[in-house]
Image: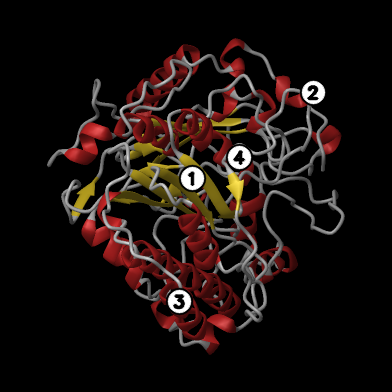
Amino acid sequence: MKLFRIATQILLLSGVIMMSSCETKTGTPNFLLIITDDQSWEHLGCYGDLAVKTPFMDKLAEEGVRFENAYAACPSCSPSRATILTGQDAYRLQEGGVLTGFIRSEYELFPSILKKNGYVLGYTGKGYWPFTKDAPDGVNEPIGVRYDRHRHEEVPEGISRRNYAANFEEFIKENKDNSPFFFWLGLGEPHRPYETGRGVNIGIDTSLIRIPAFFPDVPVAKVDMADYLAEVQWADDVVGEMLEVLDSRDLKKNTVIIFTSDNGMPFPRSKATLYNHGVRMPLIIAWDKKIKSMRVVKDPVNLIDLAPTILELSNLKIPEQMTGQSMRTLLLSDSSGFSSEKRDFVVTSFEKHTHCRPNELGFPRRAIHTEQWTYIVNYEPDRYPMGNFEIRIPNWDILGETDPGPLKEFYIKNKTHPDYHKYYDLAFGKVEREELYNHEEDPDMIHNLADNPDYLELKNRLSKMLEDYLLQTKDPRASGNSPWDEYRLDK
């Protein structure tokens, strides 16, 4: 990666004319949204991970605000990205709430609003994907112009060949009149597949890796996790290169930099679940001197809050259809709290990720997350949450809601082993209709307290809060409907 960075620096220095001012012609800020693919919240140095080295993301956290309780609205790639673009909960987006759906043109997208008000838009890497292209009333390019011409000649196995920073540089060079810009960097990392053993080979100390309580503490778990962390480190290097592009043109001073991920890590009991490792995201926001540095916010926030936040920071009206809340006051003040009434919880949802159950049915669930508690309701507990064992998706795997990988293979091979079957059950077995977790004491969420009478009052209160929110935001399931079962989209 160092060789790639040197090449990028040469590109930046050759033919680059420094802008005379960091201010845009409208006086509104620029936005750089950096979103990794499949990364849980805890796997950055600034979040306490001792094994991974992420100096650029850590520096960004020092310069801005780090959120301890940020959540993706949905733990699946394209539905999560659809919620970010629309500022709405996933269950409100019809086909957009499932993996291979599409965003209907009736929804107001914050990039489109920015464009109508003088912003130039661009993206590189993974944007809104995967989705059904050319759908009636669907939006094919919801972010902006795609910049993907620049490629690395050689990269490790499993790493995207895109030269993200060079593509960003091309976008910046084309903005000759200094218009305010929004740019989306969609990293392909740390999505699977990985180069097996690369993490250990580049020096990641497996003895420092925290193995979640729902993983067996076996060598394959540490090696697989090390390979995942190696891709996180690659992403961190890319973040460093992107910041170099901003610095080279004196743009960082007036650019709001947002770093997050779309859903949790591609491991058992993580991605495609509403547990911490499925929906709890890293979120860092920095804006030079305008956001006080080295702040840590524990208030629950949702990635649907990004759209109204970006619009309000741009002095633009927030559409009524957006269910997210602006974080402008929270960002620009020294203390926590939203611009409207303070919110003490966020809601996440899931319908289906892949077609891994009979009749392509999903596993509908909703969750409410506070600073300390997570309550989950599973509407169809008789179904398997991660898919059926006997259904194999072509070119994929069985138990299809979990990505194929060495650790998943270990679970399957040892599903009846007396020492390991409990891990298989946690990852792939059926679950109760209600789940309640104290995620301050149990961040890995393996101790379900829903049936404990000591927590009955708390469970009922959270259940009522969730029900009220779902009714208020017009979730079809709150009215007993399930339109998702009827969708037959591209596989």
Q: Residue 50 appears in which quarter of the rendering?
A: bottom left
The CA span between labels 1 and 2 is: 25 Å
According to the image, what is the colour scheme of the structure?
secondary structure
Q: Which residue is mark 3?
A: 14
Quick one: quadrant of the C terminus? top right
How dense is the environment of label 4, judged by Cα within 10 Å: few (below 14), some, or many (20 and up)? some
Q: Would you say residue 75 is visible in this rendering? A: yes
Q: Which residue is mark 1?
A: 279
Q: Which residue is mark 2?
A: 486
- Residue 362 rendering spot, x and y as whole percentages: 72, 34
Q: Would you say residue 272 is visible in this rendering? A: no
Q: Which residue is mark 4?
A: 431
- The three-letter amino acid code for the residue at tag 2 is Glu
The CA span between labels 3 and 2 is: 55 Å
- The three-letter amino acid code for the residue at tag 4 is Val
- Which of label 4 and label 1 is nearer to you? 1
Q: Residue at x 74, y 45 (%)?
A: 387
- The three-letter amino acid code for the residue at tag 3 is Ser
Give the structural element (helix, strand or loop) at label 1: helix
Q: Of marks 1 and 2, which one's residue comes earlier in the chain?
A: 1
The CA span between labels 4 and 2 is: 24 Å
- Which of label 4 and label 3 is nearer to you? 3
Q: Of marks 4 and 1, which one's residue comes earlier in the chain?
A: 1
- Residue 314 rendering spot, x and y as whole percentages: 33, 33
* 248 or 16, nearer to the observer: 16
The CA span between labels 4 and 3 is: 58 Å
Q: Of marks 4 and 3, which one's residue comes earlier in the chain?
A: 3
Q: Of marks 1 and 3, which one's residue comes earlier in the chain?
A: 3
Give the structural element (helix, strand or loop) at label 3: loop
Q: Of marks 3 and 2, which one's residue comes earlier in the chain?
A: 3
